[in-house]
Amino acid sequence: MSSSTSHTIIPGLVSLDVGLGADKAAVIRALAERVVAQGRATDADALFSDAWAREQKDETGLPGGIAIPHAKSLAVTTPSLAFARLRPGVDFGADDGPADLVFLIAAPADAAEDHLAVLSKLARSLMDDDFTAGLRSAGTDDDVVAIVRQAIGESPAARNGAAPAAAAPAPTAATGDRPRIVAVTACATGIAHTFMAADALTAAGREAGVDLVVEPQGSSGYQALPPEVIRDADAVIFAVDVDVREPQRFAGKPVVRTSVKRGIEQPGRLIAEAVAASSDPRAERVAGSADAAASAASGAQESVGARIKRWLLTGVSYMIPFVAGGGLLIALGFLLGGYQVTDDAANVIVENSLWDLPAGGLGQYLGSVAFMIGATSMGFLVPVLAGFIAFAIADRPGIAPGFVAGAVAVLMSAGFIGGLIGGLLAGFIALWLGRLPAPRWLRGLMPVVIIPLVGSIVASGLMILFLGRPIAQLMTWLTEWLNSLNGASAVILGVILGLMMCFDLGGPVNKVAYTFATTGLAAATASQPFSSPYLIMAAVMAAGMVPPLAMALASTVLARNLFTPVERENGKAAWLLGAAFISEGAIPFAAADLFRVIPASMIGGAVTGGLSMAIGVSSLAPHGGIFVFFAIQPIWGFLVSILAGVLVSAFAVIALKKWVHKREAPVAAPVDTAVPVAV
């Protein structure tokens, strides 16, 4: 394999001591053109647009004269690093001035691991003065290539049959008097905030003279820190909103635990706290494998509310795939077999086959198959929710008690509220059992036998004996109240749900509304196909489609002159994203103009939610937008509700852009999204 395709950086991607333009847009475009010229991408304009959209969400300038614009793009065919040493430097948004060392990271759209791995390794290398000094003193393109390949773990390749060029020395290890900190960053969806916090901590560690290495645990996986790096660390920072993966690796280390947002906003203070904890014998420490995550979660630096939120979000994040897939299959079952498919689907499957069709023919049989698979998937909703809440509290030993408690909640008709309570109970009991002192001969059995056994008995026993019936009665009252909603009360509920869906575009408030709708949908799968839970699901989905569609309409049709060229390009993509109920299509607009886009979106979302409930629109599917039209009734009411909200939001954002002064302070994207669900 040639070096042009086997390496991330080649000499043809390097530009030394050049002026590529007066601003960062010109620099990014020039580097994108260089990637295309080397045959590693097909369209410079498309690559520039993707990189520029990322730049608008959050500027990529770092302290020390460095910038790392980056993008995943359909135009990229080979993961690449394009490098420029600028004369003069160009402002990329760093507080300490222009950047003279600029890397453009270009990754294929489907190569998330390459993108994240290169970004992580490069960011860590940029912490080291020797690395940046080597780039500034490099005399040739080949020297730069050797330095960078050494830093990102690619061995130098021979050129023209000659011996490989000498690589720059590896970044020096921390000295004995230089604190060594490791950090983990993770958010609920594992994209924007995860890596924003990682970048902020890396930059702050460099400024503070701390040897800091970050492990971003993103949605597509993560590159685990080397064991020797963790072993030599003086303390650990967990800047996370969900459970840390494999926390037992950090057992025994002093830990500072906080939210991912604080990792972005106060990285310097976090590093100072970690340095102080490293020499404080009273500091909290990460526990062993049985309860490492729970011990970290119980740190004094995280409020009770924040801990509960993190536990619940962990459960919800694992639950959503079951809801989305199962709900769509149930809707498909209704489409193929009619709404009577619920009556005898199990018997149709057992007693018939493709070669022995039932009286209703192929449609009834395939509809029954789809319905039963979907119903089975939805049946896991409460146990998965409870199991992974317990996992967030007590790590792996909590999973079995949590799943069993969730299954018992279903048995007792306690619904998702029973699952929440059962998961919390199972997690706390497993955590307590894991902390009990045990003789050496019993320790190996604790996480795999004793804790699952005793935890399941106690948590599920409490659900059966004391909690199940009261919670089941509460769920009955809630169901009756929802089914009694009509007229003004239903419209008000729709307005509230619409406001929540558009408030933070995938943040906690949005997740509450979406989870409320999907859990109600799961509970109603065997009831009347157009009862209140289906009305709520339609209102939530319709409102969640409004922000991207409204921004698309405003930026590509109604008021193109009020939006930047990149926003107009984003608007083209937002049409499809909005139609599919993927709210992240509005995030580039909100990131660039938060205080005008979000209020406009909320107004339209409220109109759509209220109108959907007033018309009585029902959705049997929890996701898919207009593409699950067959599961929505009446479809005209769904479309009218969305159109009304989109028009209101579009004209509202245009009015705000014309007559309301934009805040000058840069703002970050309101949420981080990745998974194509509007939650």
Image (cartoon, helix red, strand yellow):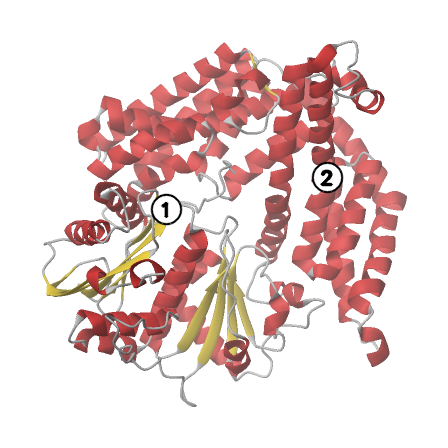
The x, y position of residue 636, in whole percent, is: 49, 10
Picture disc at residue 669: 1
* Residue 398 placement: quadrant: bottom right
Q: Earlier in the sequence, mark 2 or mark 1?
A: 2
Specify the amino acid type for callout 2: Phe
Q: Residues within 10 Å of mark 2 (few under 14, many from 20)?
A: some
Looking at the image, which residue is at 23% across and 57% down?
93
The foreground one among 330 and 47 is 47
The picture places residue 330, in percent across and down from the top left corner, at 66, 25
Q: Hey, which residue is sitting farthest front in the picture?
A: 161
Horizontal side of residue 530 vs 7, given as left or right: right
Residue type at the position of mark 1 = Ala
Q: Residue at x 81, y 34 (%)?
A: 413
Task: Check disc 1 and report its element: helix, strand or loop.
Answer: loop
Q: From the viewer's side, name the closer residue of 49 and 300.
A: 49
The reply to whether discs 2 and 1 touch (Cβ–Cβ < 8 Å) is no
Residue 675, percent from left and from top: 50, 42
Answer left or right for 285 relative to 95. right
Question: Which element is circle 2 on?
Answer: loop
Q: Nearer the viewer, mark 2 or mark 1?
A: 2
| Residue bearing the label numbered 2 | 380
